[in-house]
Amino acid sequence: MVQRELRNFERDGIQLPNSNLSRIADLRHKEVINIADGKRLGFVKDAEFSLDTGRITSLILPCRWSILQIFGRIEEIVIPWRDIKKIGDEIILVDLKER
């Protein structure tokens, strides 16, 4: 995954020790569901984390197909860590009220 420097969010995320790096890749196989409206948002594409703290600060999902993709502009859904409510074996529940 691409390592990106991020702005600070209200909730810092989780600490990822070196021994847990394989678990980051496991996130890519989990489907993300918004509990606010029950919609399936897709699968995790990437994660952003702070290089200073080593904490994940958000998850990135590819946006559903749009006309913009024809013109080479790929939209993404960025989910701040504070909106992630539960990570299960197969799904990640998020609470995005304003989507």
Image (cartoon, rainbow, N blue to C red):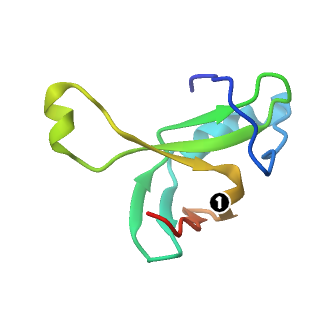
Kindly tell me whether residue 23 is visible in this rendering. Answer: no
Of residue 53 and residue 92, the one placed in the foreground of this image is 53
Residue 49 x/y as whole percent: 70, 32
Amino acid type at image mark 1: Asp
Disc 1 crowd, CA 10 A, few/some/many (<14, 14-19, 20+): some
Q: Is residue 39 left or right of residue 56?
A: left
Viewport quadrant of the C terminus: bottom left
Of residue 91 and residue 97, the one placed in the foreground of this image is 97
The residue under the point 20% across, 36% down is 68
Kindly tell me whether residue 88 is visible in this rendering. Answer: yes
Badge count: 1
Residue 52 drawn above or below residue 45: above
Residue 18 x/y as whole percent: 83, 28
Residue 48 drawn above or below residue 81: above
The residue under the point 44% across, 77% down is 37
Q: Quadrant of residue 15?
A: top right
The residue under the point 78% across, 50% down is 10
User: Helix, strand, or loop for circle 1?
Assistant: helix
Of residue 28 and residue 41, the one placed in the foreground of this image is 41
The residue at which mark 1 appears reads as: 83
Residue 23 x/y as whole percent: 69, 42
Q: Is residue 50 left or right of residue 60?
A: right
Q: Is residue 75 left or right of residue 28?
A: left
The residue under the point 21% across, 25% down is 72
